[in-house]
Amino acid sequence: MTFTPWKARGAALVSGLLLAAAFPPLNWWPLALVAMVPLLLAVWTRHNKSVPALMHTIEPNLGRSGGEPGLVEEGQHSVDPCGQNARTPYSGALPMEGVGASVGTGTQGRDGFAAEAAPETHGPEPRAPLFWPAFRLGWLFGFVFFTSTLWWIQHVTLPGMLALTVYLALYPAVAMGVAGWLRVRPAEGRGVMIGKLILLAGVWTGLEWVRSVALWGFPWNGLGVPLFALPTARKIVAITGVTGLSFFVFGVSLIVAGLVWQKGRKSWRGLLAGAAVWVLVEGLTAGLSEPTPDQRYHVALIQPNVTMEEKMSPDPEVQRQRYFDLEAQTAKAFGENEKSGFDLIVWPESAVPNYFDEMVAGGAFVDQLQQGDFTLVTGADHREWDKLYNSIAVMRGTVENRAIHPKIRLVPFGEFIPFRKEVPLFEKLLGNLIPMDFNAGTSLEPMRVEGQPFSIVPLVCFEDTIGEHARRFIRPEPQVIVNVTNDNWFHESPATEMHFANARWRAVELRRTLVRSANTGVTAIVSPRGDIERIPSFQKRELHGWFSTGTSEITFYARHGDLFSQVAGTVGMLGCAAVAVSRRRRRRRFLP
C-alpha cells in the first residue's frame, strides 16, 4: 500500500471531512471512530521521492566476509521490512543503516553484490526524515477539520477564525509528525507495533490536553466529543474527562488502520467481529441505569431568542422591551404551572439590558421574585467602580438576598483584547467592537443564597465547555450546574449545536445536573446519566422540567481533573524519548 504525495494529501482531506461530519450539524458520530484511518495509512505508508521511506538497504559485500558498513550506490539492491526484494535505482548515495545477521553472508551475485537476502527485522531502522512530511499531512487534516467545524466564527471575525484554525491545526500536525517518525510497521512484530500504537494514543491525548490549557485554552471538538450517545463513554469520562476519552477513540482508529495495513482484505473479518462485540457491550451497558435520587426540583429555562441587532440596538425602547419580554415569558411559565410552581428560574447570559446594580436600583426583578419561593438566576453585566464584569446573578425572595459571580474565563478578542496597550494594531482593528475590556473574576466558590436548598455551580458563556474549570466548583453537597450563555453573535449557524455538543459532557463528568439557558439555544437539561430535555434553537420558548441535585458523590475527574490525559501524554513523550535513545544506540552499533 503506497500513497503518492497527492494521494496522501487527499487522504488527509478525507479524514478531516469525515471527522467534521461526526459533529453538528450532521452528527454522524460513528465516523469519529474511523475518520483518522485514511490519514494514518497515508502517514505510515507515504511514498517519499527524496528518501525511500520504510526501506532497509542491503550493503554490498565487496568480497569481504564481514560485510562492513558502507554506502549503497545507484543500482544496488534493497529490501523492504517484509523481506521483498526490489531493485530500486537511487540518484546519489544514502547512508548505510545496517543489516541483520543474514545480510552480507548469503550467495554472492555478479560484481560482488548479494543476490538474495533474508528478511531483516533486527537491524536499526532507517533514517528517512518522515516527521515533516507527516507533520504537513497532519496540519492539512487539522486545518480542514477545524475550519469545517468552526467556520461560523467568521460571523464575528474572518481573520480571527482563520488564525484560530491555523493555530489549532498545529496539534494534530505534531501528533502525525510523531506517527511518521515512529514508523509503525507490521514486520516489527505484534508487541512492538502495539507498543507504538499506545504511545501514539498517549501523544494525541496529551496534545489535546495541552490545547485545552495553552494560551487562553481552547478545548472544543476533541475526538471524544461526538460520542455522547454511547453509555460506556458517558461512564468512562467520570474518570478520564472528555479529553481523556480521546485516548480510546484515537486508539480505535489506530487499531483499524493497523489491521487494514497488515492484513488487507482479511482484516475486515476481525473488524466486523470486534464491532459486533462492541455493539453487544454497549447494549448491555445501556440497560444498566443509575438510581435516581428522590430529591427533585422544578425548573423553568427561558430562551428569549434576541437577535444581535436587538441586543446591540441604541434605542432605549428596544432595550426596555427586551426586559418586558423576559417578564412575559416568566409569567407564561408560571401560568402553565400554577400547581407545582418552580424552584429555579434561569434567564440567559446578558439577559437584562443594563448593568445589574442599575436594574436593581430601578426596581427590576421585584415582580418576578414575589411570585413564589424560588431562585432566580440571570446573566447580567456588572460594574464595580471602573471595572466591568460579565456576571451571573442569583436572587431569592428579595433583591437584597442575592449573590453575584463574575465570569473567570474570558474570551480573547471577544471580551477583552490581549496585549491591547502593547500591540496598537489590535486596538486599531478591534477597538470599536470592544471599547472596554471585561475583567475576570477569581472566586471558585459555588453560589448560595439564603433559603436555597442546593448550591449552584456558575458557568458563564463558554465556561461550560471547560471541564477543568467546572470541576473546581464541585463540593460534597447537593448541587446543580447552571450555565447562562448567548450565541447570537454567530447568527443562525451551527454554533449553538456545536457549543452544546461540548457543554453536555459536564453533567456526566461531574455527576451533576446541567441546566442551561441560552439566548438563541441550545436551552436544555442534561441529567448526570446523560438524559437530555431540550427545545429547538432560534425559537422564543420556555423549557419546564425537573432536575435532581444528586448525592454528595465526587467523581475521580472532579477530584483530579485531566490527570489521565496528563499521564497518557507524559507516557507517550517518555516512550518516544526511549525509542529515540534506542535508535541512536543501534546506529552507533552498526555504523563505523
Image (cartoon, rainbow, N blue to C red):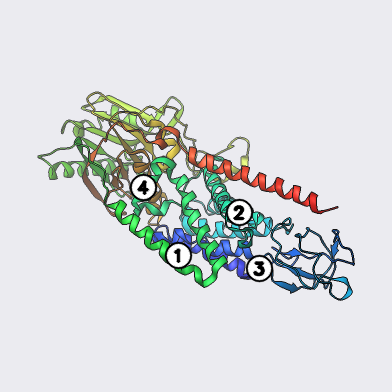
Q: Confirm whether residue 312 shows in the render.
A: no
- Nearer to us in this view, 441 or 288: 288
What is the residue that sits farthest to the left in this orientation? 339
Give the residue pinned by disc 2. Answer: 192
- Nearer to us in this view, 82 or 229: 82
Q: Does the CB distance between marks 2 and 4 fall below 8 Å?
A: no
- Asked whether, in this view, residue 299 is left or right of residue 225, the answer is left
Residue beneath the point at 58% across and 68% down: 10
Secondary structure, mark 1, is helix
Mark identifier at residue 234: 4
Residue 166 locus on image (x, y percent): 58, 53
Spatial separation of the CA atoms under disc 4 and disc 1: 23 Å
- Asked whether, in this view, residue 433 is left or right of residue 42, the answer is left
Q: Does the CB distance between marks 1 and 2 fall below 8 Å?
A: no
Identified by mark 4, the residue type is Arg
Q: Does the CB distance between marks 2 and 3 fall below 8 Å?
A: no
Residue 277 locus on image (x, y percent): 38, 59
Secondary structure, mark 4, is helix
Other-residue count near label 2 (Cα within 10 Å), few / some / many at <14 / 14–19 / ≥20: few
Give the residue pinned by disc 3. Answer: 5
- Asked whether, in this view, residue 141 is left or right of residue 588, the answer is left
- Of the image marks 4 and 1, the number of the one nearer the N terminus: 4
Residue beneath the point at 47% across and 45% down: 244
Give the residue pinned by disc 1. Answer: 271
